[in-house]
Amino acid sequence: MSAISPTPRPQPLYLDTRPDPTFVTYHRPADTDARDTAVLLCPPFGFDEVCAYRSLRQWALTLAGQGYPTLRLSLPATGDSGGAPRDPDRLGAWTSATALGADWLKRASGADRVVAIGIGLGGAVACTAVAEGAPIDDLVLWGVPSRARSLVRQLRAFSKLELSLFYEGLPAPPPMAEGELEAGGFVLSAETMRALDALDLTMLRLPDRKHRRVLLLERDGMAVDDGLRASFERQGVTLRAAAGDGYASMTSHPQEAVPPLEVFERVSGWLAEAAGVASGERPDSRDVVEGASPQAELSLGQTTVTETPIRIPQAFGDLTGVLVAPAHRPAHGLCVLLLNAGAVRRIGPGRMWVTAARAWAQRGVPTLRLDVEGIGDADGDGTPYREDGALYVPGLVPQVISAIDHLQEQGVGERFILGGLCAGAYWSFHAALTDSRVIAALMINPRALVWDTGLEPARDLRVLLRERPSLSKVRRIATPARVRTLVLWLLGAPLRWLRAATSQRRVPLIDHQVDQLLERLLASDKRALFLFADHEPLHRELVGSGRIAALQASPHVTVEYVPVHDHTLRPGWAQRQTLQILDRSIDRELSDVQTITA
């Protein structure tokens, strides 16, 4: 791979697309290294996009370091962009945003040519945008079929598998609206489904463009689509097909995703065959080129809220986040921080944090969606997070507190509510006990309040030895990584952990630490919400040890339950139940602070 040069800091912006602003990140190369070709990164859809986000960030940094101005898109109704999945004409909005992104990138970079790298559904949208006249010269298409219904078929299969696991042994939720599809926590409306079913890329005609090139990448050994290849050949483009190993590892899980470095290198080599050195005058990097803004205004019903990307300096680099604020600063001083759900970036599982933050800002409560070190767009190394224990560390709590410091210094809030799922719940709990400005912690499915390296293997062994595990439980446990961890732990497990694995109690040292922490919580006047899905291990341990009764007896603690077998609450029904519970917590805090300030 060609040498990588230092580049300016990535620039988060909102394209002025209508009706929904499109969140983008612009990676500008060093002026001395700039090429005459710019790259537009068009992501896959849904859970694939969530898993691949950090890899695509690395790809954009790599491309910019090689001299290619690069723009990463979050299509309308996805990620941090405006809109919702059931809004009308999503395919049209995606196509328009892709075209406007290419146009803005060309003007912002001064590049002669624009290459779109489209992955999965993002590739199908990019092809559609080109056919409709978008200023895209060349295409790299990875895992893109000629018929979008093939992608929909894959999502249907994924959805069917999920539903067989999420409600096993539980009451089934109400059915979705006819024609809709939900997969990985993300929804395609009936209208969008019909539009995708009808989208045939072989029927598109690309406008004549001098020396148009297309690179088709296989998907982990699956050959490129013959129909798509034949269509491009008929249109006289310069076509090449190449291996594309690494798609599955890039989209496997946010914590376990591995950047496909060989694909990065292969695409860079292909780009270099036609790219030259930039010439002529280029826009000033300090300017925001017309058509984009550093913040967005969203109209929600009768109110308007603003969304602003922020950075919070740390010793290792910057934390990143998006602050959603009401049009007028409220007098109550209440502010919410929503923290990462494990290694899922600031949008939250199934984009729940985006929905919640906008609703609460609409009601006058500023809300920050935060990325801590190595997650989302924050600086730092995310590699250690392949092990859960690396997320459940006290060392990440000061980063949350530094975000509180920043918001207070900026006059955004004085009283803070922290919320998170999984590790984000753990950080919320410990920050609430540490910082007097935190008045409430909303904790969804924390895996632990105190972490130990033997915790997860002991739990897995307990399920296998003491319970009659369902098929869904066995599947969750029998992943290669967890089996390997369990075997290694068994080979070196001390007797104390083996005993703990066969009971509902934990080892004495951890029991004592948990008791101390819960006593501190109960002695405070801070509100706490513990929300658990079905068969969450910490909930079972709190019940088995009798601690849950003490928590429920406190007037400041609420324990809630959502009947679904999914740690990240991906089903839409479970998300709606969770958001209603969170809304009630916000109502209580708003009522209290408004009484205090009255």
Image (cartoon, rainbow, N blue to C red):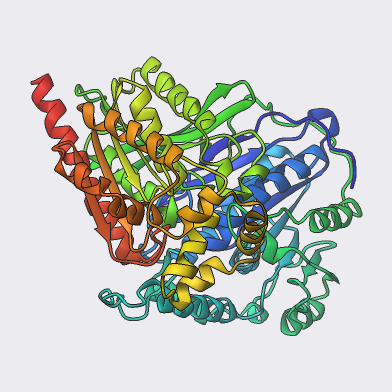
598 vs 358: above or below: above
Q: Quadrant of the C terminus?
A: top left
Residue that appears at 32% across and 37% down: 305
Q: Position of residue 201 (x, y in %)?
A: 64, 77
Work out whether residue 536 can be spotted: yes
Furthest residue toward top: 409
Residue that appears at 66% across and 77% down: 145
Q: Position of residue 477 (x, y in %)?
A: 54, 66
Q: Position of residue 73 (x, y in %)?
A: 58, 50
Q: Is 284 on the left or on the right of 534, as rendered?
A: right
Pick the front one: 241 or 589: 589
Q: Is 334 on the left or on the right of 488, as rendered?
A: left
Furthest residue toward front: 495
Pick the front one: 392 or 235: 392
Q: Is 474 on the left or on the right of 554, as rendered?
A: right
565 vs 398: above or below: below
Report which quarter residue 366 is drawn in: top left
219 vs 333: above or below: below
Report which quarter residue 58 is drawn in: top right
Q: Position of residue 100 (x, y in %)?
A: 57, 51
Pick the front one: 335 or 164: 164
Work out whether residue 376 can be spotted: no
Report which quarter residue 508 is drawn in: top left
